[in-house]
Image: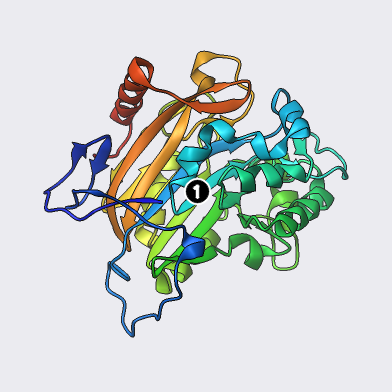
Amino acid sequence: MVALGSAAALGALALGGWTVASGRQGSVETRPAASQQRPTTEPAARSRLGSGEAVTLAFGGDVHFESPIREQLTASPSRVLAPIVPVLRRADIAMVNLETAVTDRGVAAPKEFVFRAPASAFTALDAGGVDVATVANNHGMDFGKTGLADTLNAAKARGVPVVGAGRNDRQAYAPHRVTVHGQRLAIIGATQVLDDNLIPAWTAGPSKPGLASAKNEPRLLRAVREARRTSDTVVVYVHWGVELQSCPTGDQTSLADRLVAAGADVVVGSHAHVLLGAGMKQKALVAYGLGNFVFYAFRELTSQTGVLEVTVTGRRIDGYRWVPARISGGIPRPLSGSARTHELESWKQLRSCTDLGR
Protein backbone atom coordinates (compact mmCIF):
# COMPACT_ATOMS: atom_id res chain seq x y z
CA MET A 1 0.00 0.00 0.00
CA VAL A 2 1.37 3.42 -0.93
CA ALA A 3 0.74 6.75 0.74
CA LEU A 4 2.26 10.17 0.14
CA GLY A 5 4.56 11.42 2.87
CA SER A 6 4.58 14.78 4.70
CA ALA A 7 5.59 18.10 3.15
CA ALA A 8 5.79 21.86 3.35
CA ALA A 9 4.58 22.86 -0.09
CA LEU A 10 2.11 25.72 -0.44
CA GLY A 11 -0.89 25.39 -2.77
CA ALA A 12 -1.05 22.81 -5.54
CA LEU A 13 1.94 21.51 -7.48
CA ALA A 14 2.97 18.45 -9.45
CA LEU A 15 5.37 15.98 -7.87
CA GLY A 16 6.29 12.72 -9.54
CA GLY A 17 2.88 12.47 -11.20
CA TRP A 18 1.04 13.55 -8.04
CA THR A 19 -0.89 16.77 -7.78
CA VAL A 20 -0.21 17.90 -4.22
CA ALA A 21 -3.30 19.72 -3.10
CA SER A 22 -2.69 20.99 0.40
CA GLY A 23 0.70 21.43 1.94
CA ARG A 24 2.13 17.91 1.67
CA GLN A 25 5.11 16.66 -0.30
CA GLY A 26 7.92 14.19 0.21
CA SER A 27 8.89 10.54 0.14
CA VAL A 28 6.65 7.67 -0.82
CA GLU A 29 6.17 5.32 2.10
CA THR A 30 5.12 1.68 1.88
CA ARG A 31 2.52 0.52 4.39
CA PRO A 32 1.02 -2.90 5.12
CA ALA A 33 -2.46 -3.70 3.88
CA ALA A 34 -5.42 -2.52 5.92
CA SER A 35 -6.16 -6.13 6.89
CA GLN A 36 -2.68 -6.37 8.42
CA GLN A 37 -3.02 -3.29 10.59
CA ARG A 38 -2.93 -3.73 14.33
CA PRO A 39 -6.07 -2.67 16.21
CA THR A 40 -5.80 0.92 17.39
CA THR A 41 -7.42 2.77 20.26
CA GLU A 42 -9.53 5.73 19.17
CA PRO A 43 -8.42 9.03 20.73
CA ALA A 44 -10.86 10.86 22.95
CA ALA A 45 -11.06 13.79 20.53
CA ARG A 46 -10.49 13.81 16.77
CA SER A 47 -8.80 16.63 14.89
CA ARG A 48 -9.38 17.48 11.24
CA LEU A 49 -6.55 15.07 10.48
CA GLY A 50 -8.09 12.18 12.41
CA SER A 51 -5.33 9.83 13.50
CA GLY A 52 -2.81 11.84 11.48
CA GLU A 53 -2.01 8.87 9.24
CA ALA A 54 -2.40 9.03 5.46
CA VAL A 55 -4.71 6.68 3.55
CA THR A 56 -4.53 5.98 -0.18
CA LEU A 57 -7.76 5.47 -2.12
CA ALA A 58 -8.08 4.17 -5.69
CA PHE A 59 -11.15 4.62 -7.90
CA GLY A 60 -12.10 2.97 -11.17
CA GLY A 61 -15.17 3.59 -13.32
CA ASP A 62 -17.91 1.42 -14.78
CA VAL A 63 -17.67 -2.37 -14.56
CA HIS A 64 -19.86 -5.01 -16.17
CA PHE A 65 -19.17 -8.53 -17.41
CA GLU A 66 -20.80 -8.65 -20.84
CA SER A 67 -18.88 -10.04 -23.83
CA PRO A 68 -15.95 -10.10 -24.42
CA ILE A 69 -15.39 -10.00 -20.65
CA ARG A 70 -17.97 -12.73 -19.98
CA GLU A 71 -15.80 -15.32 -21.72
CA GLN A 72 -12.80 -14.38 -19.58
CA LEU A 73 -14.94 -14.48 -16.44
CA THR A 74 -16.13 -17.97 -17.33
CA ALA A 75 -12.62 -19.23 -18.05
CA SER A 76 -10.83 -17.77 -15.03
CA PRO A 77 -12.63 -15.25 -12.81
CA SER A 78 -9.60 -14.68 -10.58
CA ARG A 79 -7.57 -13.52 -13.61
CA VAL A 80 -10.03 -11.11 -15.24
CA LEU A 81 -8.54 -7.95 -13.70
CA ALA A 82 -4.95 -9.21 -13.71
CA PRO A 83 -3.46 -6.37 -15.83
CA ILE A 84 -4.75 -3.66 -13.46
CA VAL A 85 -4.31 -5.55 -10.16
CA PRO A 86 -0.93 -4.00 -9.25
CA VAL A 87 -2.46 -0.51 -9.44
CA LEU A 88 -5.53 -1.35 -7.38
CA ARG A 89 -3.64 -3.31 -4.73
CA ARG A 90 -1.17 -0.58 -3.92
CA ALA A 91 -4.06 1.44 -2.46
CA ASP A 92 -5.48 0.92 1.00
CA ILE A 93 -9.03 0.98 -0.39
CA ALA A 94 -9.97 0.43 -4.04
CA MET A 95 -13.49 1.07 -5.34
CA VAL A 96 -15.41 0.70 -8.62
CA ASN A 97 -18.95 1.12 -9.96
CA LEU A 98 -20.50 -2.31 -10.56
CA GLU A 99 -22.98 -1.60 -13.32
CA THR A 100 -24.80 -4.91 -13.58
CA ALA A 101 -27.23 -7.14 -11.73
CA VAL A 102 -25.44 -10.20 -10.35
CA THR A 103 -28.17 -12.80 -10.84
CA ASP A 104 -29.49 -15.56 -13.06
CA ARG A 105 -33.09 -14.84 -12.09
CA GLY A 106 -35.61 -12.06 -12.39
CA VAL A 107 -37.45 -10.33 -15.24
CA ALA A 108 -35.59 -7.85 -17.41
CA ALA A 109 -36.56 -4.20 -16.95
CA PRO A 110 -38.33 -2.44 -19.86
CA LYS A 111 -35.25 -0.62 -21.17
CA GLU A 112 -32.90 -0.78 -24.14
CA PHE A 113 -29.85 -2.21 -22.38
CA VAL A 114 -29.89 -4.63 -19.46
CA PHE A 115 -26.80 -6.21 -17.92
CA ARG A 116 -26.44 -9.30 -15.78
CA ALA A 117 -23.50 -11.32 -14.50
CA PRO A 118 -22.95 -14.56 -12.56
CA ALA A 119 -21.88 -14.58 -8.91
CA SER A 120 -18.28 -15.13 -10.04
CA ALA A 121 -18.27 -11.39 -10.85
CA PHE A 122 -17.54 -10.82 -7.17
CA THR A 123 -14.76 -13.41 -7.31
CA ALA A 124 -13.21 -11.34 -10.09
CA LEU A 125 -13.54 -8.10 -8.13
CA ASP A 126 -12.15 -9.61 -4.96
CA ALA A 127 -9.18 -11.21 -6.72
CA GLY A 128 -8.65 -7.97 -8.64
CA GLY A 129 -8.04 -5.92 -5.52
CA VAL A 130 -11.45 -4.20 -5.33
CA ASP A 131 -12.42 -3.55 -1.70
CA VAL A 132 -15.86 -1.99 -2.16
CA ALA A 133 -18.29 -1.44 -5.05
CA THR A 134 -21.26 0.83 -5.57
CA VAL A 135 -24.30 -0.67 -7.28
CA ALA A 136 -26.26 2.60 -7.32
CA ASN A 137 -26.60 3.13 -11.05
CA ASN A 138 -29.05 2.77 -13.93
CA HIS A 139 -28.35 -0.98 -14.22
CA GLY A 140 -28.43 -1.95 -10.55
CA MET A 141 -31.99 -3.26 -10.80
CA ASP A 142 -32.02 -4.43 -14.42
CA PHE A 143 -33.62 -7.66 -13.16
CA GLY A 144 -35.87 -6.16 -10.54
CA LYS A 145 -36.06 -6.78 -6.81
CA THR A 146 -35.13 -10.42 -7.32
CA GLY A 147 -31.96 -9.48 -9.17
CA LEU A 148 -31.08 -6.88 -6.54
CA ALA A 149 -31.55 -9.39 -3.71
CA ASP A 150 -29.31 -11.84 -5.56
CA THR A 151 -26.67 -9.13 -6.05
CA LEU A 152 -26.62 -8.27 -2.36
CA ASN A 153 -26.50 -11.93 -1.35
CA ALA A 154 -23.68 -12.73 -3.78
CA ALA A 155 -21.65 -9.77 -2.55
CA LYS A 156 -22.09 -10.87 1.05
CA ALA A 157 -21.18 -14.46 0.25
CA ARG A 158 -17.93 -13.36 -1.40
CA GLY A 159 -17.17 -10.73 1.24
CA VAL A 160 -17.14 -7.74 -1.12
CA PRO A 161 -18.94 -4.78 0.50
CA VAL A 162 -21.42 -2.95 -1.71
CA VAL A 163 -23.04 0.44 -1.19
CA GLY A 164 -25.88 2.32 -2.82
CA ALA A 165 -28.55 -0.36 -2.52
CA GLY A 166 -30.42 -2.21 0.18
CA ARG A 167 -33.57 -3.85 1.39
CA ASN A 168 -34.81 -0.41 2.50
CA ASP A 169 -33.64 3.19 2.27
CA ARG A 170 -31.71 2.99 5.54
CA GLN A 171 -29.51 0.25 4.10
CA ALA A 172 -29.29 1.83 0.64
CA TYR A 173 -28.00 5.20 1.88
CA ALA A 174 -25.83 3.70 4.63
CA PRO A 175 -22.06 4.08 4.20
CA HIS A 176 -19.55 1.31 4.16
CA ARG A 177 -17.44 2.04 7.24
CA VAL A 178 -13.84 0.92 7.55
CA THR A 179 -10.89 1.99 9.70
CA VAL A 180 -7.48 2.18 8.00
CA HIS A 181 -4.32 3.38 9.77
CA GLY A 182 -6.58 4.57 12.57
CA GLN A 183 -8.63 6.68 10.14
CA ARG A 184 -12.41 6.19 10.10
CA LEU A 185 -13.69 6.18 6.51
CA ALA A 186 -17.33 6.31 5.39
CA ILE A 187 -18.08 5.47 1.74
CA ILE A 188 -21.52 6.23 0.25
CA GLY A 189 -22.95 5.35 -3.17
CA ALA A 190 -25.87 7.02 -4.97
CA THR A 191 -27.21 7.50 -8.50
CA GLN A 192 -28.42 10.65 -10.19
CA VAL A 193 -29.19 8.63 -13.34
CA LEU A 194 -32.40 6.59 -13.49
CA ASP A 195 -34.82 6.05 -16.38
CA ASP A 196 -37.84 8.28 -15.74
CA ASN A 197 -40.28 5.38 -15.94
CA LEU A 198 -38.28 3.38 -13.39
CA ILE A 199 -37.59 6.00 -10.70
CA PRO A 200 -40.46 5.00 -8.37
CA ALA A 201 -39.78 1.27 -8.65
CA TRP A 202 -36.00 1.52 -8.31
CA THR A 203 -35.72 4.05 -5.46
CA ALA A 204 -35.33 2.53 -1.99
CA GLY A 205 -37.98 3.45 0.56
CA PRO A 206 -38.63 2.90 4.28
CA SER A 207 -39.87 -0.64 3.67
CA LYS A 208 -38.98 -1.05 -0.02
CA PRO A 209 -35.80 -2.46 -1.55
CA GLY A 210 -34.01 -0.32 -4.09
CA LEU A 211 -31.19 2.06 -4.83
CA ALA A 212 -29.90 5.18 -3.11
CA SER A 213 -31.21 7.86 -5.45
CA ALA A 214 -29.49 11.23 -5.68
CA LYS A 215 -32.74 12.50 -7.14
CA ASN A 216 -33.92 12.43 -3.54
CA GLU A 217 -31.25 14.96 -2.74
CA PRO A 218 -32.32 15.76 0.84
CA ARG A 219 -32.09 12.07 1.75
CA LEU A 220 -28.61 11.75 0.25
CA LEU A 221 -27.36 14.92 1.94
CA ARG A 222 -28.71 13.71 5.26
CA ALA A 223 -26.72 10.50 4.84
CA VAL A 224 -23.57 12.53 4.17
CA ARG A 225 -24.11 14.77 7.20
CA GLU A 226 -24.70 11.75 9.42
CA ALA A 227 -21.55 10.07 8.16
CA ARG A 228 -19.58 13.28 8.69
CA ARG A 229 -20.30 13.30 12.42
CA THR A 230 -18.57 9.97 13.07
CA SER A 231 -15.95 9.78 10.31
CA ASP A 232 -12.55 11.25 9.55
CA THR A 233 -12.95 10.96 5.76
CA VAL A 234 -16.24 10.85 3.84
CA VAL A 235 -16.33 9.56 0.25
CA VAL A 236 -19.34 9.76 -2.07
CA TYR A 237 -19.40 7.84 -5.37
CA VAL A 238 -22.17 9.16 -7.64
CA HIS A 239 -23.53 7.81 -10.91
CA TRP A 240 -24.18 10.99 -12.90
CA GLY A 241 -23.63 12.97 -16.09
CA VAL A 242 -24.62 12.57 -19.74
CA GLU A 243 -23.37 9.74 -21.90
CA LEU A 244 -20.41 10.70 -24.12
CA GLN A 245 -20.33 14.26 -22.75
CA SER A 246 -16.88 15.10 -21.37
CA CYS A 247 -17.89 18.25 -19.46
CA PRO A 248 -20.00 18.18 -16.28
CA THR A 249 -23.62 19.27 -16.39
CA GLY A 250 -25.24 21.83 -14.13
CA ASP A 251 -26.89 18.97 -12.23
CA GLN A 252 -23.45 17.50 -11.51
CA THR A 253 -21.81 20.74 -10.41
CA SER A 254 -24.72 21.76 -8.17
CA LEU A 255 -24.88 18.33 -6.53
CA ALA A 256 -21.12 18.38 -6.00
CA ASP A 257 -21.45 21.77 -4.28
CA ARG A 258 -24.10 20.43 -1.94
CA LEU A 259 -22.23 17.20 -1.18
CA VAL A 260 -19.11 19.15 -0.26
CA ALA A 261 -21.15 21.56 1.88
CA ALA A 262 -22.72 18.56 3.64
CA GLY A 263 -19.29 17.21 4.54
CA ALA A 264 -17.97 15.06 1.68
CA ASP A 265 -14.18 15.10 1.33
CA VAL A 266 -13.94 13.08 -1.88
CA VAL A 267 -16.67 13.01 -4.56
CA VAL A 268 -16.13 10.76 -7.58
CA GLY A 269 -18.45 9.53 -10.27
CA SER A 270 -19.09 7.77 -13.54
CA HIS A 271 -21.78 7.04 -16.17
CA ALA A 272 -20.76 9.05 -19.25
CA HIS A 273 -18.52 6.22 -20.60
CA VAL A 274 -15.90 8.90 -21.28
CA LEU A 275 -13.50 10.68 -18.96
CA LEU A 276 -14.32 14.01 -17.29
CA GLY A 277 -12.09 16.37 -15.33
CA ALA A 278 -11.03 16.24 -11.70
CA GLY A 279 -9.72 18.79 -9.25
CA MET A 280 -10.33 20.70 -6.06
CA LYS A 281 -13.67 22.20 -5.01
CA GLN A 282 -12.93 24.21 -1.89
CA LYS A 283 -11.01 21.70 0.26
CA ALA A 284 -12.59 18.60 -1.27
CA LEU A 285 -11.55 16.59 -4.32
CA VAL A 286 -14.15 16.09 -7.06
CA ALA A 287 -13.73 13.78 -10.06
CA TYR A 288 -16.69 14.17 -12.41
CA GLY A 289 -16.12 11.14 -14.61
CA LEU A 290 -13.94 8.03 -14.40
CA GLY A 291 -15.18 6.55 -17.68
CA ASN A 292 -15.45 2.86 -18.43
CA PHE A 293 -13.21 0.42 -16.56
CA VAL A 294 -14.07 -3.25 -17.13
CA PHE A 295 -16.47 -2.70 -20.00
CA TYR A 296 -16.84 -3.26 -23.71
CA ALA A 297 -15.48 -0.26 -25.60
CA PHE A 298 -15.84 0.16 -29.35
CA ARG A 299 -14.33 3.59 -29.93
CA GLU A 300 -11.21 5.43 -28.80
CA LEU A 301 -12.94 7.78 -26.36
CA THR A 302 -14.80 5.02 -24.53
CA SER A 303 -11.65 2.91 -24.26
CA GLN A 304 -9.74 5.66 -22.43
CA THR A 305 -9.64 4.75 -18.76
CA GLY A 306 -7.45 4.65 -15.68
CA VAL A 307 -7.35 4.69 -11.91
CA LEU A 308 -7.67 7.83 -9.80
CA GLU A 309 -5.36 7.58 -6.77
CA VAL A 310 -6.10 9.95 -3.88
CA THR A 311 -4.14 10.32 -0.66
CA VAL A 312 -6.03 11.75 2.31
CA THR A 313 -5.24 12.42 5.94
CA GLY A 314 -8.59 12.83 7.63
CA ARG A 315 -10.26 15.76 5.89
CA ARG A 316 -7.08 16.90 4.15
CA ILE A 317 -6.51 15.99 0.51
CA ASP A 318 -2.76 15.41 0.41
CA GLY A 319 -2.52 14.63 -3.28
CA TYR A 320 -4.09 12.88 -6.24
CA ARG A 321 -2.98 11.47 -9.55
CA TRP A 322 -4.34 9.75 -12.62
CA VAL A 323 -2.90 6.39 -13.70
CA PRO A 324 -3.81 6.16 -17.42
CA ALA A 325 -4.91 2.88 -18.96
CA ARG A 326 -6.59 1.67 -22.12
CA ILE A 327 -9.39 -0.87 -22.42
CA SER A 328 -8.51 -3.81 -24.66
CA GLY A 329 -10.74 -6.87 -24.83
CA GLY A 330 -12.91 -5.24 -22.16
CA ILE A 331 -10.05 -5.07 -19.63
CA PRO A 332 -8.09 -1.96 -18.49
CA ARG A 333 -4.39 -2.20 -19.20
CA PRO A 334 -2.03 0.46 -17.74
CA LEU A 335 -0.08 2.53 -20.26
CA SER A 336 3.62 3.31 -20.28
CA GLY A 337 6.06 5.52 -22.16
CA SER A 338 4.81 8.11 -24.62
CA ALA A 339 1.27 6.69 -24.64
CA ARG A 340 1.04 7.20 -20.88
CA THR A 341 2.40 10.75 -21.13
CA HIS A 342 -0.06 11.66 -23.88
CA GLU A 343 -3.08 10.26 -22.04
CA LEU A 344 -2.06 11.95 -18.80
CA GLU A 345 -1.84 15.35 -20.50
CA SER A 346 -5.22 14.79 -22.17
CA TRP A 347 -6.75 13.94 -18.79
CA LYS A 348 -5.39 17.11 -17.21
CA GLN A 349 -6.94 19.20 -20.00
CA LEU A 350 -10.40 17.88 -19.13
CA ARG A 351 -10.42 20.13 -16.07
CA SER A 352 -10.66 23.21 -18.32
CA CYS A 353 -14.44 22.89 -18.75
CA THR A 354 -15.16 22.26 -15.06
CA ASP A 355 -15.55 24.49 -12.05
CA LEU A 356 -12.58 22.83 -10.34
CA GLY A 357 -9.11 24.05 -9.40
CA ARG A 358 -5.84 22.18 -9.16
Task: Please state the horizontal and vertical placement of residue 33, each as a whole percent of the image.
Answer: 46, 57
Residue at image location 51% in from the left, 14% down from the top: 300
The answer to which quarter of the image holds residue 260 is bottom left
Residue 264 x %, y %: 39, 58
Front residue of this view, candidates 284 and 123: 123
Q: Is residue 195 visible?
A: no
Q: Position of residue 206 (x, y in %)?
A: 70, 68
Residue at image x 57%, y 55%?
216
Among all residues in the image, which is located at the extreme bottom?
A: 44
Q: What is the tally of numbered marks visible in this picture?
A: 1
Task: In the rendered view, tell whether residue 337 sits above or below residue 278.
Answer: above
Residue in the picture at 42% in, 58% down:
32
Q: Quadrant of residue 280?
A: top left
Tell me where residue 311 appears, x and y as whole percent. Answer: 33, 51
Which element is circle 1 on?
strand
Q: Judge left or right: residue 220 versus residue 234.
A: right
> In the displayed structure, would residue 116 be above or below residue 123?
above
Q: Is residue 296 left or right of residue 285?
A: right
Quarter that holds the C terminus: top left
Residue ID for mark 1: 94
- Whether residue 28 is visible to the viewer of this picture, yes or no, is yes
Residue 137 occupies which quadrant of the picture?
Answer: top right
* Disc 1 residue type (three-letter): Ala
